[in-house]
Image (spheres, rainbow, N blue to C red):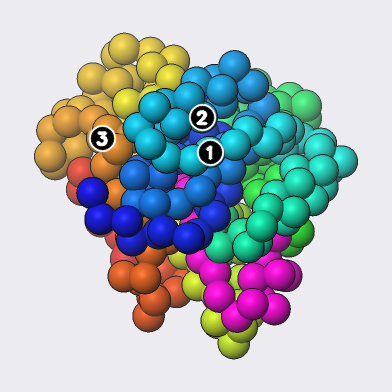
Amino acid sequence: MEKTLSGKTALVTGAASGIGKATALRLAQAGANVLVAELDAKGAAQTVAEIADAGGTARYLALDLCSGEAIDRCAQEALATPGGIGIVVNVAGWGYSQPFVQNTPDFWDRVMAINLNGPIRLTHRLVGPMFEARSGKVVNVASDAGRVGSLGETVYSAAKGGLIAFTKGLAREAARHGVNVNCVCPGPTDTPLYQAVPEKLRDAFVKAIPLRRIGQPQEVAEAILFFASAQSDYVTGQVLSVSGGLTMAG
């Protein structure tokens, strides 16, 4: 496996399972030192152990995206890493399908905190040193729900749409500092969050996807690796859908 990220430290949120875990493992395979930023300590420990078993290096950082203080502590510990942070990947996300009229304000607050406000705060803490170093990659993982909307996920779609817009705005500001900012938008992907979707809806997704199957976390991780690596040095402010062709909007 080519070590394209050798010497780089990558912080990955939501790396205890699903796309986040697949991303942490893939970046480690590419040679990165991975900081596994997670609320789920047990799941994070498993990810760290798998990376170590494969000959990579990783470390767990506690992170609760609903707590500003926890985000600040995580960022401070990350920035103390020798050599600094070269790659930030905001993968963590949360939500579930429910009619908008049944939503509660507490539900909205949690969805917005985990999917938008938390990643913004964490990135704000980490990107300054990247600007000073005139080097770095930020990869935000949004969702095709943020591009085209999703039935039963109105506020989640709003949060992910906000993350897409945040990506583009930050990309314009970061470019002059030598930092690339891009966004990956998964479609239906085989993750614990997806498995919670009713089976009837999952079947409908498969029928609607031109490639006629659900995506795998590893496939999304490959797109994230592209944006995290030198292969994307002339790419910034872009949104890449990894959805089997489910959405084809520009």
Horizontal arrangement in the rendering, residue 223 relative to residue 238 (left or right): left
Is 191 or 103 nearer to us in this picture?
A: 191
Task: Tell whether position 135 is magenta.
Answer: yes
Q: Residues within 10 Å of mark 2 (few under 14, many from 20)?
A: many
**Residue 142 x %, y %:** 49, 48
Disc number for residue 58: 1
Q: In this figure, which residue is indicated by the disc labeled 2?
A: 48
Q: Is residue 134 above or below residue 157?
A: below
Tell me how many marks there are.
3
Horizontal arrangement in the rendering, residue 217 relative to residue 166 (left or right): left
Disc number for residue 88: none
Q: Nearer the viewer, mark 3 or mark 1?
A: 1
Please provide the residue range marked out in magenta. 126-143
Badge 2 amino acid: Val
Q: Residues within 10 Å of mark 3 (few under 14, many from 20)?
A: many
**Residue 22 x %, y %:** 38, 35
Horizontal arrangement in the rendering, residue 74 relative to residue 116 (left or right): right
Is 227 or 87 nearer to us in this picture?
A: 87
Calculate the distance from the C-alpha at mark 3 to the C-alpha at mark 2.
Answer: 24 Å
Is 172 or 55 nearer to us in this picture?
A: 55
Calculate the distance from the C-alpha at mark 3 to the C-alpha at mark 1.
Answer: 26 Å
